[in-house]
Image (tube, grey):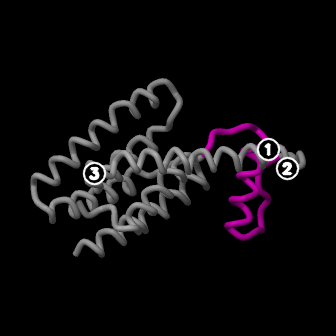
Amino acid sequence: MAPLLALAIILCLLAAGWRDLAVRRIPNGIAAAVAAAGIGIRALEGLTALGASAAAAALLFLPLFLLFARGWLGGGDVKLAAAIALGLPPAAVWPFVVVTALAGGVLSALYLAAIRARPQRRGPAGRGRGLLRRVLAAEAWRIRRRGPLPYGIALCASGVLLTATGHLQG
């Protein structure tokens, strides 16, 4: 059962990353599905494991909520981070934070490089292109306008990495 729940988490995180890139929104349903699968995995290990993970997720949520309140992090990012933490043993929450920060640094560096490398054009993506091309064209437009980073991608990359490498088991 745990491998199926882990696969569900990975698929949900891939969908969340795509949505964050495409429209800068992480649907509540995706965060709820990640949380539910994580709760399921932790509950398989017992109520003590589930309680410890819930406490760790709450401790992560509090500072992230303060970052959201200051406008430094999106609400979807906060919900998704807490949902991912629900499925992690408490000892894996700190590695999740570190890997997310590193992935965010790589994402930021890519965006800084893209700002310098992209020629200036007007408007978002044109019609008649494939979905991926339209999303990339819209992203180039956002980069030129100095729009916010889709930090959910860093969260998703970290969550997928930890899930795929077996960090969900306590």
Around disc 1, counting alpha carbons within 10 Å, would you say few (fewer than 14), some (14 to 19), or many (20 or more)?
Answer: some
Image coordinates for residue 126, horizontal then vertical, percent: 79, 59
Q: Is residue 22 left or right of residue 86?
A: right
State the CA–CA distance, disc 2 to disc 3: 39 Å
* Start-end of magenta stretch: 123-149
Element type at mark 1: helix
Q: What residue is disc 2 on?
A: 118
Image coordinates for residue 162, horizontal then vertical, percent: 40, 61
Image coordinates for residue 69, horizontal then vertical, percent: 44, 26
Amino acid residing under circle 2? Arg
Q: Is residue 35 left or right of residue 118?
A: left
Q: What residue is disc 3 on?
A: 86
Q: Residue at x 20, y 59 (%)?
A: 42
Amino acid residing under circle 3? Leu
Q: Residue at x 29, y 75 (%)?
A: 3
User: Which of these two is toward me, 92 or 82?
Assistant: 92
Residue 89, magenta (yes or no):
no
Question: Can you see residue 167?
Answer: yes
Q: What residue is disc 1 on?
A: 115
Image coordinates for residue 44, horizontal then vertical, percent: 15, 65
Element type at mark 2: loop
Amino acid residing under circle 1? Ile
Element type at mark 3: helix
Q: Residue at x 71, y 52 (%)?
A: 139
State the CA–CA distance, disc 2 to disc 1: 6 Å
User: Which of these two is toward me, 16 or 169?
Assistant: 169
